[in-house]
Image (cartoon, helix red, strand yellow):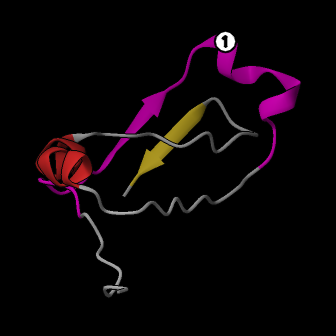
Amino acid sequence: TRKAPKLTAPARPTPREVKQLSDIDDKGSLRFRYQSFFFTRMTLHLRCREETLSRCFLYLQFGKELFLLCN
């Protein structure tokens, strides 16, 4: 049986700040903007890690600039 999708939200709000990225982030292959969504089946193994996932802090590769605006 299928269950309704569940969003794992961040444990804390994203800080509002500007992060300067390193020179490695200025690669030509990273000079584009994209959005990603990941879907997975909820197993007992993943259920145990849901709290851990909510604490992960990801900065996506925005490209074009060497700064990332977190808002």
> Horizontally, is 71 left or right of 13 in the view?
right
User: Which residue is nearer to you in this view: 12 or 18?
Assistant: 12
Q: Is residue 12 magenta?
A: yes
With respect to residue 55, does 26 lie above or below? above
Q: Are there few (<14), some (14-19), or many (20+) residues within 10 Å of tag 1?
A: few
Q: 69 or 1: nearer the eye?
A: 1
Three-letter amino acid code at the position of disc 1: Asp
Lateral position of residue 35 relative to residue 47, left or right: right
Query: In this orientation, does residue 10 appear?
Result: yes
Q: Is residue 15 visible to us here?
A: no
Q: Quadrant of the C terminus?
A: bottom left
Give the residue at x 81% y 38%. 31
Image: magenta residue range: 9-32
Q: Position of residue 38 (x, y in %)?
A: 52, 59
- Residue 55 relative to residue 39: left or right: left
Instruction: Identify the residue position indicated by label 1 in the image.
Output: 23
Q: Residue furthest top?
A: 23
Q: Which residue occupies 35% across, 80% down? A: 5
